[in-house]
Amino acid sequence: MVAATTAGSAALDAYRAACPVHVLYGSETGNAEEISRTIHAALSDHGLTPGVLSPMKAYATAGFAPTGMPATPPGEAPPPRPLYVLVTSTTGDGDPPENVRPFLRYLRRKDLPAGALGGVRYALLGLGDTNYENFCAAGKRVDGALRKLGAVRLGPRADADDAVGLEAVVEPFIASLYPLLVEAVAAAAAAAGVGASSVVTDEATVLAAVASNAAASAATAGVTAGGADPVAAQANGASPAAEAAIGRAPTAVAAAVTTAVASAAAATPTAADAAAATPAAADAAAATPAAADVAAATLTAADAAAAPALDAEMADLIAAVAAAELADPAAAAAVPPLLSPRAVVEHLPPGDATPVAPASAVLTPAVEADTVFLATLTAATRLTDDVEGDDSVKRVWHLELTPTGEGAAAASAAAYHPGDAFGVVTANRDEDVVTVLKRLAGDLSGDEVVRLVTPPDVGVAAGAPPTVAPVVGGAVTVPTTVRRLLAERVDLGGVLKKSALRALAEHCGDDAATRRRLLFLSSRAGKAAYRRTITDAGRGLTRLLAEVAPSCAPPLDTVLDVLPPLPPRWYSAASAPAVDGAVLHVALSVVTTADGRRGLASGSLDALASALSARGDDPPPLLRLVRRTADAQDDTPGGVPRFRPPTDLSVPLVMVGPGTGVAPFRGFLRARRAAVEAARAAAATAGRSPPAVGDAWLFFGCRHEARDYLYREELESYVADGTLAQLVVAFSRDGGGAPVTGAAADGTSAPPPARNYVQAQLRAHGASVAALLTDSDMARVYVCGDGAGMAAGVHDALVEVLTVHGGEAIGGTDGAAAVVAGWAKTGRYVRDIWYWGGGSEEE
């Protein structure tokens, strides 16, 4: 095991103090940033020196030089190399967040020499969702690029899956991280000749020791580090006794917690021992409530039964978390720490002449300023025969957005491809803003003018880099009103994270029961209740204040700090630059949420479209749009083509897009028609034979032929002029659906069921589809739409079609599944799918 002798401990401590741990994150919805803040906040508790905490785009402030790690001047001892903790989410189909892309561009620089990052040691946590094809792709890309340049990863990369709950991997990763970093510092010190001579310096031995210590630490926290696989949670309670208390009567809970606290106290050093170890520990011991205070604060059985509770389990366990939190610092670790604020609110005096942020400014940190451009809504056409109050048909608009030439990304507004998506900057509902305003501490009206400033105590030492990169860059450094900050900066309806509940618990006044309820929901022991009460219920701040914490009155600083940023809503382009120029087309489905209200973006755009249709020539409304940066438009990791049509017109393709999932395929077909016409004209001019054009099939689905057959006339025109070889339509509520071209369904398949979906039509045309996809090694399949039902059904149908009609070479169902998986890896099977309620996908 890596260790320093007593004689060298002072030198090791000095080396550790000079060896910062930088925490860099890539985040769009706030998950990776919150995890990074939590990691950074606890570094000093483990004897580590906190370094920079910032997005990965600020990599230069964390020690990365243009040519790699800075060289040591001749004759000088090399300074301690920083350690890095990297946390990144993945967006879309394997895309890195915007604030990661500059770092990836740096890592891909051709002038970086081999081994340029040989001095870098890092731990990496990726966040993703296995519902999407390229799971945790951003983390894998960063990891691969670093290792290619000689960086050394400390321990296995952890990939957390939002589909089953990020905490299952995140919590054990964090638990094992700190001992891993401590050991890495000791190993680096030994390699530099600092500390005891008995320190092991062989890297393989060091990493083995690090893994061993990390596993031991994780076991102490109730988790297991999973070797090369993502770490997995083993238990979630603060202690076995507290965990076992779930479901018991309040009196049994109190007894279990008493046993747990007593066990923890017996295994914990006394205050005197702690004081002898570190001065900080002595201060902590002095601040720990006495046993009498704990007893007085612990709920009795009657109190717990009478406390306002969300359910029986909550009433039973409030006593457990209250006792654990108050009695022992080790038990208190089950509750997330209070994080230092990223920014504070500065109130400007009434009448201050400082200009406020213009209406075109984007205030949400979920959007990078250099990706924004402005556009006007210039056309709106209703595509559906929908009736207010009738949910059988959703309202869908065809919208046309014309860029104004303003905004940082205006120059590239027309440089998109069919299949690309763009974001619409949105705002919270007025009624939700009013609700939160009424609950804020300080009796704010909303019209006060404020600005966000970086807290004064963000440095680790004089002359040291800031630990928190300013998060108030861009327009939010310009003064604006409280009302507008609440409307546009944070997501008032976004699901609250545990750290938010922990912070809100401090603002419940004298209502101890509500405070304990929020603490419980934020704790490890409250995992099940948190998932049921917050995650599954989709509770954001407005509902929490109304339904769970009626006494909570947080200050504006806290609300702006703990809520997730308000993300843009993403929509596929239904247009093609070759035909439509810079004008963007979108098929907008108006979403109705579980509480009966319209979606934030779709509801707002619905109102604007209705008003535009009614008022005619009045000035069109202005929208703020978001475009992915140029490098994000390139191929996905490994060179796999994105969701774009093939440039080679001879490539056969099958497109599956029910509902508004047809939008990108409209763009595909507009571009394909123009390309075919141009190629034929060029061939005729040159006296050549017309170009070969592969067959293109489109499977479209809707509920009713007469009410929501989107773009019907245009789609049928593509069949008439040969742009489409087949248009197959499934009407799920009419019980029918047939190919428009008149080609009969394959007789070998069973007839479509009464409720007819696109996957049924794929099976009905199985022999033709299989022949199209297997006769050419370039044929592609594109799927767009709902990822939960439709996309899974289409995937199964593809496997079945190949199994039945692909011939003996396919090798049955397992062989067919392997073929489809191979197509996905090579870009022959590409999906653009979204999950309702996901927040970051098309509404």
Image (cartoon, helix red, strand yellow):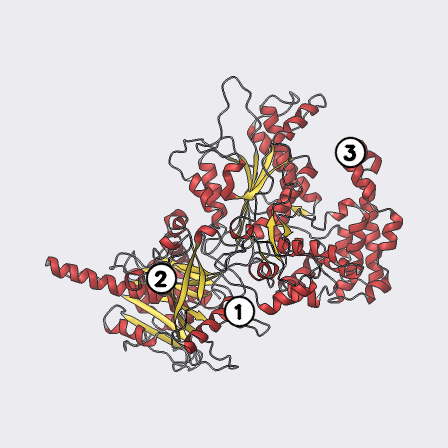
**CA separation, marks 1 and 2?**
31 Å
In the rendering, at what x and y percent does residue 779 appear?
Answer: 30, 59
Q: Is disc 1 surrounded by few (<14), some (14 to 19) or many (20+) residues within 10 Å?
A: many
* Of residues 818 and 742, the one drawn nearer to the viewer in this rendering: 742
Question: 53 above or below 20?
Answer: below
Q: Mark 3 points at which residue?
A: 279
Q: Is mark 3 on a helix, strand or loop?
A: helix
In the rendering, at what x and y percent does residue 364 appear?
Answer: 54, 56
Q: What residue type is labelled 3?
A: Pro
Q: Mark 2 points at which residue?
A: 781
The residue depicted at 41 percent of the width and 65 percent of the height is 376
Q: Which amino acid does label 2 sit on?
A: Val
- Mark 3 or mark 2: which comes first in sequence? 3
**CA separation, marks 3 and 2?**
64 Å
Q: Name the residue under label 1.
A: 599
Mark 1 or 2: in front is: 1
The residue depicted at 79 percent of the width and 55 percent of the height is 322
Is the C-beta separation of discs 1 and 2 under 8 Å? no
Horizontal relation, residue 424 to residue 544: left or right: left
- Mark 1 or mark 2: which comes first in sequence? 1
Residue 692 visible here: no
